Amino acid sequence: QVQLVESGGGLVQAGGSLRLSCAASGIVFRINVMGWYRQTPGKQRELVALITNSGITTYADSVKGRFTISRDTAKNTVSLQMNSLKPEDTAVYFCNAVAFSPYWGQGTQVTVSA
């Protein structure tokens, strides 16, 4: 099992920045990918960004150039720096880790006001 605890999030004005962090515990040595997803009411959860053990990153087109994902494998953490935030970035953001199976954090609300 992998446990994920998120921190960060909150309310910010459009154009502002926020940083999300996620700490993993449990069988962390089996984690090969970590990432962030987001979900709004009535919509499916969508990928925001992910990073592999070797540092390869993938971003959703909607966040490229604005968001940066990073990982500290020694501390078993993954972070998401979000800049130039837009109202459409408003969502619940979930940390994800893949260790043979997917694991999810509890989610953290990000609200961007116009």
Image (cartoon, rainbow, N blue to C red):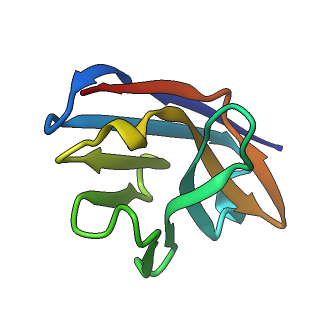
* Residue 87 at x, y percent in the picture: 34, 36
Q: In this view, does 43 lie to the left or right of 22?
A: right
Q: Which residue is drawn at the image coordinates 40% and 42% (left, top)?
A: 89
Question: Vertical placement of 58 versus 19: above or below?
Answer: below
Q: In which quarter of the image is the N terminus?
A: top right
Q: Which residue is drawn at the image coordinates 37% and 47% (left, top)?
A: 79
* Residue 72 at x, y percent in the picture: 37, 55
* Viewer-proximal residue among 45 and 56: 45
Q: Quadrant of the C terminus?
A: top left
* Residue 107 at x, y percent in the picture: 61, 29
Farthest residue toward the top?
A: 11
Q: In this view, does 78 lie to the left or right of 1?
A: left
Question: Vertical placement of 113 versus 26: above or below?
Answer: above
Question: Vertical placement of 77 versus 8: above or below?
Answer: below
Question: Vertical placement of 107 versus 44: above or below?
Answer: above
Q: How many labels does the image show?
A: 0
Q: Which residue is drawn at the image coordinates 44% and 59% (left, top)?
A: 73
* Viewer-proximal residue among 92 and 32: 92
* Residue 6 at x, y percent in the picture: 52, 30
* Residue 8 visible in the snapshot: no
Farthest residue toward the front?
A: 114
* Viewer-proximal residue among 105 and 38: 38
* Residue 67 visible in the snapshot: yes
Q: In this view, does 80 lie to the left or right of 92?
A: left
Quadrant in which residue 5 is drawn: top right
